[in-house]
Amino acid sequence: MKLIPHSRPLVGKEELSALTRVVRSGYLSTGIEGEALRKEIARQFGLKDSAVVSSGTAALHLALAGLKVGPGDEVILPTYVCTALLNAVHYVGAVPVLSDVCFADGNIDPKDVARRITSRTRAVIVPHMFGFPADMKELLKLKIPLIEDCAQAAGAKIGNKCVGSFGRAAIFSFYSTKLMACGEGGVLASPDHKVMKEARDLLSYDHRQEYRLRFNYKLSDLQAAVARAQLKKLPSMLLRRRKIAEDYMRVLEGAGVVLPSSRQGTEPSFYRFVLKVKDPVLVMSLMRKRGINVERPLFRPLHYYLGLTGYPVADRLQKESVSLPLYPSLTAGELERIKTSIVDVLKRFS
Ligand SMILES: Cc1ncc(COP(=O)(O)O)c(C=O)c1O
């Protein structure tokens, strides 16, 4: 029995031909493919200005640097997120202030953010977790610059606008497991001319008149070409994700688990299908015995690393959540196997 992985990109002849095109051109570094990707992404997601970069983490670093966040400044970020965000805050020498999250969707809790704002708060990083848009309406009322983290939410919508166009800056990731994948890669976007000017200066080191500390955060044309092929497929890949999620919802209704729920007026991109169950460890191990890789949606919340307490919702999410495989390359046979197995496993708890 072949193991069904937790994630698997949908790549094939379009990506191969994109790579061949770049190799044949003899130009591998950032060039026409990167520029074309930048324009296509901006058009598709309604972004005013953007830059393609080497990862989502690089984009987060540049967003903070572009906002001139520096030593002594505070940045609020949710605890229920990967360490990439914490790293980016440390890269600029700022102080991370962790916020708790909402139980329904794992997104940063605007009420908890409000409690943690001080005179030194310079930015709030807002990931749209698992592809489910965060409460931007309430967060915008706080009047602190928001960096939307769309690493898991490319193409998700609030009303008829894609996420990434609500904050002072936004980032995307094209890491292998993401909604559109090219191995490693990302985008920084901001409607603020000053943010983009500073970010553009910092992301590359060559051909600069004056020396200052800069980075090599460029995306190669090999990766950009693959990302372009993925972007073309994104609408159909998102549709397939939605269909699979609807299928899971149907079979799991009444199975004694808490199903994913999205905020009213939003359209998730269904990056992950997160279930809250009584015993995640047992569910994961029983599913693995059936050849299905079910994982925790988050490895560890940030407050565990920092030895902090006072994040009851994130604690509960970490104790109860598991994530089912959900991606467009799942075959019909694999999907049936997952549905039958999870229903069967959950019967043990009823
Ligand atoms: C919410 C979120 N933000 C940022 C990142 C970092 O992106 P990257 O791996 O491209 O640096 C990730 C993980 O990939 C993520 O899930």
Image (spheres, rainbow, N blue to C red):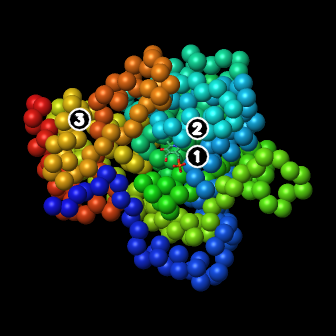
Q: Which numbered disc, 1 or 2, marks the residue that appears first in the sequence? A: 1
Disc 2: which residue:
87
> In the visual, does 276 lie left or right of 221?
left
The answer to whether the residue labelled 1 contacts the one labelled 2, judged by CB atoms less than 8 Å apart, is: yes
Quick check: can you spot residue 330?
A: yes
Under tag 1, what secondary structure?
helix
Q: Residues within 10 Å of mark 1 (few under 14, many from 20)?
A: many
- Say which residue appears at 56% left-offset and 34% top-offset: 86
- Amino acid marked by disc 1: Thr
- Say which residue appears at 66% left-offset and 38% top-offset: 91
* Image spot of residue 261 (x, y percent): 35, 36
**Residue 144 or 314: which is nearer the viewer?**
314
Q: Which numbered disc, 3 or 1, marks the residue that appears first in the sequence? A: 1
Disc 3: which residue:
281
Disc 1: which residue:
57
Q: Which numbered disc, 2 or 3, marks the residue that appears first in the sequence? A: 2
- Amino acid marked by disc 3: Val
Q: Residues within 10 Å of mark 2 (few under 14, many from 20)?
A: some
* Image spot of residue 100 (x, y percent): 47, 23
Q: Nearer the viewer, mark 1 or mark 2?
A: 2
